[in-house]
Image: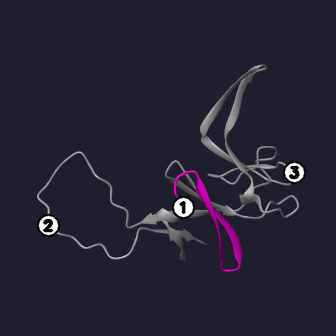
C-alpha cells in the first residue's frame, strides 16, 4: 500500500524528512535526486537513525589506500556510529544478520524535458508532484 509522505519540493536533494506511517517512524532521503526510505530506529539501542550523518562508503584494496564510493550512501547512527546502507538497509559490520528496514519509494507526477521538441497543446497539471512510500 502506498502512502503520501510529501512532495518533491519538500525533500530537495541533500535533505531528509522524517514521517510517521502506520505508526512507524520512517526517514525519507533525497540523495542527488534518488529517494530512499528506511526505518528511523537503529537496531542497536533504538536511536533515531535518520538523524545521523550521511556519507559515501569508503573502499580499500590495501592498507593506506582508499577511495570514496558516492553510489553507496550510508547513514551513521548518531548514538553509537552503527552504519547502514540506504539502498539495501544492510549494516557494514554484519551485513548478513543486521540490517535496518528499508521501504520502496516512488515519485509520481514528475515530468522531465527531453532532447526533442514536438507540437504541444496547453496542459493543466493538478496537484504537485508527490512522493509516496510503499509498505509491504
How far, Cα to Cα, is label 3 from label 2? 56 Å
Q: Residue drawn at (57%, 51%), measured in percent from left and top?
A: 14
Tell me, yes or no, whether the highlighted magenta stretch contains residue 25.
Answer: yes
Residue 125, x across and y down, in percent: 30, 72
Q: Which residue is mark 2?
A: 121
Residue 121, x across and y down, in percent: 14, 66
Q: Residue drawn at (75%, 53%), measured in percent from left and top?
A: 52
How far, Cα to Cα, is label 1 from label 3? 26 Å
Is 82 rendered above or below residue 6? above
Residue 135, x across and y down, in percent: 60, 72
In this rendering, position of residue 86 left or right of residue 115: right
**Range of magenta residues:** 11-29
Q: Which residue is mark 3?
A: 80
Farthest-out residue, bottom:
22
Q: Which residue is mark 1?
A: 11
Few, some or many residues within 10 Å of mark 2 (<14, 14–19, 20+) = few
The mark that comes first in sequence, 3 or 2, is: 3
* Disc 1, SS: loop
Amino acid at each position: 500500500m502506498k502512502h503520501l509522505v510529501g512532495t518533491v519540493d519538500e525533500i530537495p536533494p541533500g535533505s531528509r524528512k522524517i514521517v510517521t506511517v502506520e505508526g512507524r517512524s520512517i526517514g525519507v532521503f533525497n540523495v542527488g535526486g534518488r529517494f530512499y526510505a528506511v526505518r528511523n530506529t537503529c537496531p542497536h539501542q533504538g536511536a533515531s537513525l535518520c538523524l545521523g550523518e550521511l556519507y559515501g562508503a569508503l573502499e580499500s584494496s590495501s592498507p593506506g589506500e582508499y577511495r570514496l564510493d558516492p553510489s553507496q550512501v550510508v547513514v551513521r547512527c548518531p548514538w553509537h556510529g552503527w552504519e547502514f546502507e540506504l539502498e539495501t538497509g544492510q549494516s557494514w559490520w554484519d551485513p548478513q544478520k543486521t540490517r535496518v528496514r528499508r521501504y520502496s519509494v516512488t515519485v509520481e507526477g514528475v515530468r522531465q524535458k527531453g532532447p526533442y521538441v514536438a507540437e504541444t497543446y496547453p496542459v493543466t497539471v493538478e496537484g504537485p508532484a508527490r512522493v509516496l512510500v510503499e509498505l509491504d
